[in-house]
Image (cartoon, rainbow, N blue to C red):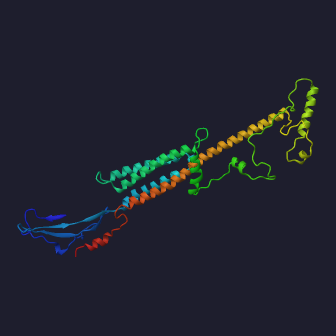
Amino acid sequence: MKFGSWTFNGDQVSLALYNNKDFVDLSDYWKSGTWDIVEVPAFLNEYSDNDGPTETDITFYITIRRKTLFYTVNLILPTVLISFLCILVFYLPAEAGEKVTLGISILLSLVVFLLLVSKILPPTSLVLPLIAKYLLFTFVMNTVSILVTVVIINWNFRGPRTHRMPNWIRLAFLKYLPIMLFMKRPRKTRLHWMNERPAAGDPQVPTTLPNTLHLPITAGVPHHHFGSPELEKNTSKIEHMELSTLHHPNCKINREMPRRESESSDSLFMTPEAFKATEAVEFIAEHLRNEDEYIQIREDWKYVAMVIDRLQLYIFFLITTAGTIGILMDAPHIFEYVDQDKIIDTYRGK
């Protein structure tokens, strides 16, 4: 504030500070709940010109600062908590079905805070307030997290019937990234158990089931005969006699038994009912194997989505932390406390 005369010059009106005090007297000052007084200096200015009269005025500088407690408790802390709550979207499992719901709920809460800030702050286009910058930053991060969440959910529910997993995805998200993110995948599926269990007993015995079970019917295999009952009776006796001589290739009895010259090493004599039973067992085994492969591919896609979730969790945590520290620390005097009682005692008139 500047005090001076518009009609009289310094030679006609003499201005001076009261009791030579170069500050504003705060004896009658009442402390404000919104503003803090930092300093109140006063200056006596004299402007002299060789050809003209002398001009004098007194200038008082009142430096005030807005209190930050109200905005910290009601705006800054809720916004910071909401921004870090946005990170938990990537920690929620995709099967829960609430990832997008959580992201949209956080987005709506940010819109409410943005409307609240727009009503409190003065409408100006010259300077963008820091709290508005931080709200916009959180708004953008939340929007990006919702987009990434949609992609993660899409990958989580992919299967071999609709998508084929490329080799670079298998290498990047199933082999290298889990190691970098300190993730360890458990192997408990039936397909891995069948393929990786150790052999129990003779090392020549295979530890996995064969892909197909070939049981060819040779010329010696009996067929259904339609004719006399005596022929069918004799045929059934021959079939039971042949089946009774079947043994495992490593069995001692099988090694000691003499083989007929007409019998080949890969031919088996069995009844039609037994052949149908072996075909049924082969079909069931193939069906279970295909089911295990289908489940394994589904689990691979789910694990890829889990790896992306964990990667985005770390990335968004780092970006949110860096943005929060960078924007809030850019605010001047945000953590500086002003002792009003001490300032009032300092500038109190004596």
Q: Could you tell me which residue is drawn at 93 percent across and 27 percent down?
A: 231
Q: Observer-nearest residue: 24 or 191?
A: 191
Residue 67 relative to residue 323: left or right: left
- Of all residues shown, which one is farthest toward the top? 227
Residue 47 at what x, y percent from top left?
Answer: 12, 68
- Location of residue 8 (image quadrant): bottom left
Residue 91 in view, yes or no:
no
Q: Position of residue 249 (x, y in %)?
A: 85, 45
Position of 21 with respect to 217 (left or right) is left
Residue 215 on image: x %, y %: 80, 37
Residue sitting nearer the eye, 23 or 245: 245
Left or right placement of residue 43 versus residue 203 in this view: left
Q: Report whether 288 appears left or right of 222.
A: left
Q: Quadrant of residue 284?
A: top right
Q: How many marks?
A: 0
Question: Which residue appears at 57% of the width and 48% of the height?
Answer: 304
Viewer-proximal residue among 177 and 327: 177
Which image quadrant: the N terminus?
bottom left
In the rendered image, the quadrant that contains the C terminus is bottom left
Residue at x 57%, y 45% (from the top left corner) = 156
Determine if residue 63 is in view: yes
74, 285: nearer the viewer: 285
In the picture as drawn, the residue positioned furthest to the left comes out as 51
